[in-house]
């Protein structure tokens, strides 16, 4: 009964079907194929704006490539203290960005808020000696399993733009945020400059995508992607994976299912045990060491969650999580004092 | 009738079959899955030495990641003037290697030879002011469609090791070289420290691999790969692609077919038109501008090949090239004066 | 009446005298000269341990070069939130360290303390996904004008070494800390691996130095320094500047004078106005906007100090500060409510 | 009798005099001082165009900083195969330029010529896979002791600009080229975008300068310089060194003297022994191993010169070379068969 990560999930059949269709073709290499073109059309349509789309194999690659296009090597990216770019990407921004820095700002439940952003910027000077903020990155759904509503994204994007920052959204779990808010995808990224479009956690295989809405930011992405070894020769097979998810609707359907599972767990967990509101497919629980041990002994797998302290645990519901596992864990949760 | 590149080829059914088998599973992320372990076992067995195997999406990533593990940022990689790392990777070594340099050495028919290597090194000094050679990279089959025999690889590797260089082999078309020489894979890389194992051109999809034989060189590769956004969460789907090719034997079978097609073209081409010996799946022909134009008008696609001068053309035979296209082109070649 | 920075100070005559002596010589370039050798001997003697010494033109270069030698590109440097490396070096660590990161830890009065360091490390994981701490950097005197006593440095160095971190000391104002504690220089850096030895603020001209006590860390410094354009051909003129300060005793004499001036200001400032203990040559005062304006109107120059809030001001006493300026400012301070 | 390098020379008294004048001052740090401003005025006047001037401690720093401002990390700098940037800067361009590459072009006697430049570019493609040339760097006087006349510089600059390349001149020995041609400095750099202005070899101490004529290229230089640890706090002491040389006329006077010494040696050397025309302060001689040994035994110091083959030797005349040493070496040269 594995609640470690949505990264452990299976691949949705729609992805395999799309691959099977694209695989036998002889097609021009390096994105000069019909699938890659169709992907740009579909994504532009989905988000209601003309977009350039660059498939990449990982979320780390998507985030780092996107942010490197926004900031010079001596620039900074304003990010939440617990963002994936800070905690789970091995310093990839420093690599892709040639030494560009994260400027970390705390915020409750994994979310950035304008008062704390203002305070952080007030402590900085605008001169040649200090790293200058050049971009803002949001994560939706956040690493704490919470979400920003469309209006919140918009407000933060405007805050950033007003200060000359480019605005990036890490959408590794964007589908989960969309279904939580019942929002249109276009509203979810309305004033965002570029997006890491998450597919792998929501049924995909080995393709995520950088989606660029701001035309000027797309200029250097092809060569950055090539030079980073992220431009596949048979690009149609990357595009097809994402097309399979989006065109079939599986992208949101899987997210809906995973969110529902997490909600069932949240409902079972005593309120005082809940560390964060449950708005996506993750539940963060306060559990003492012996309680964690008992769960593990009973066959449940999950991560300790250091940033929330030694008694924190994270349970992630996959899109293909067995109902029986969710029910078994919920029973355990209900039995907690 | 497309002779542009083996990158345009289809995916071998064995790859799709392997993917279909691995796709539905729930498996630990980040290479902690059974497929990734099996891949290391199979590759170690294939090459006759214990190896670490790191799947990556492109040959550029494989080469740059491998070479970056061999040289410090201030070091140099000795390479052929026309090597893929120099001409087709957008300076990826400089990126992955934090400014590491290529030290280019010419050689007939795309091959490095010891006299020219000796001469190049004799012109360098060993001091803090000059980039110091730290690695040697060979390509087999070469960018000129020629190959090194096992003894040649061994001699060059020994030359490099004797000078303190780590030895890398770019095997984007290693399968083609293996079948040309009828050699065992193990003999083809016998004294090499690390290998870019090519799969995509020979029936694969979006997975190549860095294969590390020298244990010390494997130490930094996991974090380098992660930080470069090249470590997929669902790693089993990368491993499975390669397993599909290797376990089915498709890897060599496709190369054999492609080589045979190129040989047929070579036999048809007047000897004085052949720019390089044809030992893999590529034919380089001397064609005047009007001859190129006539071929293109007749529906043949191929690349001009600048490094061999304005009258050079490259024809690549894919593993799934239609016999009719090969025959049609051969007829044209035979008709050339 | 300029209290902006000790960077605005004059050059001590002992430095000019040393330059005049070294200038006319014909001497081997690139540190192969007698002055460079003597500098290593003198510094080794001063700090009681064999040391390699690499003069560089700025403190930023010294810190970044030293830290880059301690951490891999994917590693992290534990530093105080307000350290110079974070706030005043334009991300130089990211540049010299090829994307290496700072891991910031807060602490009262500019000082790192073990409980906060422990807490910060407890929130991190040791895996390939997260930047791993590889070095600890201390600043003495700190950016808040406080100091670590020799025992404090020792305890922090041991804390770091016990966790596998290399320990660096940013000694831009080391002389000020030494004279404050009446300590021997050797005791001040007893368990430190490498030191940025500050000279410019305490009477020097355009030479600071990286001092390396840990022999293994010195291995890559010559080529790192050369490649960064920091290895002067006429190296004797860099060495001579530092020799002039150290051999004459001016290095500490100037610090003593500057500290005394700051102490006089501190004594004049109402206790409730003092933001930090005054242990070096800097006074941080709580001043309302109209009070700052009045001082500036009266001809006093000083910096606002954002990290301590909008009502903070920093006054730095130079080694060559005019007594009259100190007295005039002290009079103003005494008149504050 | 030391003919190793002009780097071994003494410092001209005019430099020390300027330092002595600037040293005692209290002046705003980081180039906000009157000396730094005067330097920009003087240099702009000298070269007949408004210029930004950034003093740096070494020629390596000047070249790398200047070129990094011209090319993106994935770009290339066209340079002579034997240029200092290739052979004596430890890959500094790769460091400052975040992996930017040199594109090397051969040419007789250390000089680039348009036919060979054209040929080199004809072998390259303009696509995302290949490093794209973005700058051209010339060296005057060259590493072979030859020079470009003003018209030659102009023609090469126009060639570069016509191809979208920024044009940089490495002027480590620009003074020697100027006096050789009896040209006005302004004519020597008439269509150049930015210049590494050499001072150290011609009487300076530890200051060279990046001189930027193209306003757009100056935009990122302040932060690049700061981040590289090359922006001295007491900047007036760097500016003063250069002012001392330029305002006194010593800059050209020293070059004139050094060139004359080299000419005397060239006249003494049998014509068949001369490897390159002698147009600056360096003589390259064909000498057999026993002849080199005899000279060294007689107390002459000089470098072997690998790029010109095993029998090549380089003799550099310093601005303060003793007449007796020149005469002694000339006698030896005259005695050669």
Image: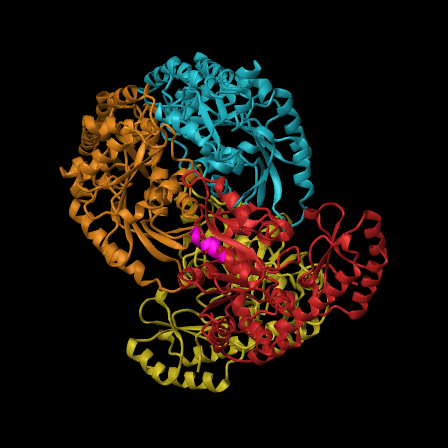
Chain colours: A yellow, B red, C orange, D cyan
Residue A227 in the image: state x and y as whole percent.
Answer: 57, 52
Q: Is residue C2 left or right of residue B53?
A: left
Residue stretch in magenta? B157-164
Q: Quarter holding the C terminus of chain A?
A: bottom left
Closest to the observer, B232 or D76: D76
Q: Locate residue B150 relative to residue C68 in the image: left or right.
A: right
Q: In this figure, what is the number of numbered marks? A: 0
Percent position (x, y) of residue A160? 52, 49
Q: Residue furthest front?
A: D337
Instruction: In the rendered view, tell whether residue C334 sits above or below residue A326.
Output: above
What residue is shown at x 24% (from left), y 26% (from top)?
Answer: C244
- Image quarter of residue A185: bottom right
Report if residue B214 is visible in the image: yes
Residue B66 is situated, as x and y percent measured from the top left of the image, at 49, 58
- Is residue B11 visible in the rendered image? The answer is no
Given residues C58 and D31, the one toward you in this image is C58
Q: Residue at x 69, y 41 (%)?
A: D122
Front residue of this view, candidates C17 and B190: B190
User: Which quadrant of the figure has residue C51?
Assistant: top left
- Horizontal placement of B324 versus C261: left or right? right
In the image shown, does B169 or C263 lie closer to the viewer?
Answer: B169
Does residue B161 show up magenta in the picture? Answer: yes
**Quadrant placement of the N terminus of chain A:** bottom left
Which secondary structure class fits the magenta region best? helix
Q: Is C10 rendered above or below residue A166?
A: above
- The image quarter containing residue A268 is bottom left
Q: Is residue A126 above or below residue A9?
A: above
Provide residue B106's location: percent of width, then percent of height.
59, 46
Q: Is residue D7 part of the magenta span, yes or no?
A: no
């Amino acid at each position: 009964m594995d609640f470690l990560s949505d990264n452990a999930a299976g691949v949705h059949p729609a992805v395999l079907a799309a691959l099977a269709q694209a695989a036998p073709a002889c097609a021009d290499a390096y994105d000069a194929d019909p699938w890659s073109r169709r992907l740009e059309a579909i994504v532009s349509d989905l988000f209601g704006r003309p977009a350039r789309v660059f498939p990449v194999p990982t979320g780390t690659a998507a985030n780092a490539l996107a942010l490197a296009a926004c900031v010079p090597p001596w620039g900074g990216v304003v990010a939440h203290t617990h963002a994936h770019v800070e905690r789970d990407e091995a310093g990839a921004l420093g690599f892709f960005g040639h030494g560009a820095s994260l400027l970390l700002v705390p915020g409750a439940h994994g979310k950035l808020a304008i008062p704390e952003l203002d305070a952080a910027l007030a402590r900085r000077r605008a001169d040649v000696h200090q790293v200058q903020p050049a971009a803002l990155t949001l994560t939706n759904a956040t690493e704490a399993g919470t979400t920003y509503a469309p209006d919140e994204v918009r407000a933060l994007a405007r805050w950033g733009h007003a200060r000359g920052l480019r605005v990036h959204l890490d959408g590794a779990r964007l589908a989960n945020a969309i279904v939580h808010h019942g929002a249109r995808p276009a509203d979810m990224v309305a004033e965002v400059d570029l997006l890491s479009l998450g597919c792998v956690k929501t049924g995909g295989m080995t393709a995520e995508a950088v989606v660029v809405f701001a035309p000027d930011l797309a200029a250097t992405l092809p060569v950055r992607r090539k030079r980073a070894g992220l431009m596949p020769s048979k690009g149609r097979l990357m595009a097809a994976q994402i097309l399979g998810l989006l065109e079939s609707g599986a992208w949101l359907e899987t997210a809906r299912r995973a969110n529902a599972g997490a909600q069932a767990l949240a409902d079972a967990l005593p309120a005082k045990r809940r560390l964060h509101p449950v708005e996506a497919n993750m539940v963060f629980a306060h559990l003492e060491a012996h309680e964690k041990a008992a769960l593990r002994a009973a066959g449940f797998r999950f991560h300790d969650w250091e940033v929330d302290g030694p008694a924190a645990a994270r349970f992630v519901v996959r899109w293909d999580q067995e109902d029986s596992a969710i029910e078994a864990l919920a029973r355990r949760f209900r039995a907690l004092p």
